[in-house]
Image (spheres, rainbow, N blue to C red):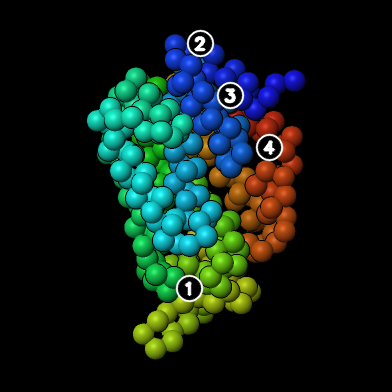
Amino acid sequence: MLTGQTKGQDLMNGASTSTGIRSALSYCVQQVRNYDYHHYLCLLCLPPNMRKAAFALRAFNVETSRAMDIASDPKIGLMRLLWWQEATDKIFTNKLIKHPTAQALAAVTTEHKISKSWLKRSVEARIKDAQREDSEIPQTIEELEKYAEDTVSTILYMTLQSGGIRSTIADHAASHIGKASGLLLLLRSLPYHASRDRMFSYIPAEVAEKHGLLVKDGGRVGIPADSREALCGAVFEMASVANAHLKKARELAGTVPAEARPVLLPAVPAQAILDTLSRVQFDVFDPRLAKGILGVPPLWFQLKLKWYSLRGKY
């Protein structure tokens, strides 16, 4: 039976890497497997020559996306993100960093000439989000779409780049899939954030006001966590925007280069979240959302992903 480390090393077979870098890459595989399982399954469908970079990039996303969640104090979480901001600078100046994900990133950015600007854009968006007050909610859904593009679409852009894929159409599809995925993952995380600060901090003010969720107290505005019934309408509206992005991405499928399509498989888990939300009438507190993989039985999810992969679809 393979251990977690052996599995990670096996996924990287065929790559000419030193023992230290191989160990760092194996760490990345395990991080993605443990904390971003649906994307771990997507990455297994990539050609072997793209997996090193893809797992390093996804592990970077795991590190930065979890920074605030695992911190006992928001200031500590922000410090972690600032550390990653500094680490990205060091990566591109060939300075040694004693962190396996950073070491793996340094190796793949050098090998594949990955753009520094996209890495910086991703971590800076998370820093900006971490610095806002709980009562400082986004005003428009466009703000959240930009956040989703900066943090999710950029991972897809860099994965395409690592595979030597230069296609404006593929980038356009990746932009839409990243926005859809980012919005849907924010919706899915609403109960978690509500349990931490008793507020729905990722519902835009314009959407919240439309559905009678916005509460004003003096100069402060917020969306209290006891507004569950009205919340479903707001979630439906945001999910509809995500669905529109997925549709636009799939309309481009016929002109997306074949070698780019495996990179765009995250459209499948995004669709799974949409389907589950629809099944529970957009109630993000419904326990069915937490079952299986994104509310889908694991075997069914894997079969569906494989079906799309084998047919060159997303």
The answer to whether residue 218 is visible is: yes
Please name the residue shown 33% across and 39% down the image.
87
Q: Which label sits on residue 125?
A: none
Residue topped by disc 1: 208
Seen from the viewer's position, the closer of residues 125 and 314 is 125
Residue topped by disc 3: 8
Name the secondary structure under disc 2.
Answer: loop
Please name the residue shown 42% across and 74% down the image.
135
Q: Are marks 1 and 4 in contact (CB under 8 Å)?
A: no
Label located before the other in sequence (3 or 4): 3
Q: Nearer the viewer, mark 3 or mark 4?
A: 3
Give the class, few, some or many, for how many residues have Cα within 10 Å of label 4's Cα (few <14, many ≥20). many
As drawn, 94 above or below 250: above
Residue 260 appears left or right of 192: left
Q: Position of residue 173 (x, y in %)?
A: 41, 37
Seen from the viewer's position, the closer of residues 259 and 92 is 92
Amino acid type of disc 2? Gly
Please name the residue shown 53% across and 37% down the image.
266
How much space separates mark 3 and mark 4, taking CA atoms? 22 Å
Q: Position of residue 74 (x, y in %)?
A: 45, 62
Give the class, few, some or many, for how many residues have Cα within 10 Å of label 3's Cα (few <14, many ≥20). many
Q: Nearer the viewer, mark 1 or mark 2?
A: 2
Q: Position of residue 69 (x, y in %)?
A: 52, 55
Label located before the other in sequence (1 or 4): 1
Residue topped by disc 4: 301
Label located before the other in sequence (2 or 4): 2
Q: Residue furthest bottom?
A: 218
How much space separates mark 1 and mark 2, taking CA atoms? 51 Å
Label located before the other in sequence (2 or 3): 3
Q: Which label sits on residue 14?
A: 2
Amino acid type of disc 3? Gly
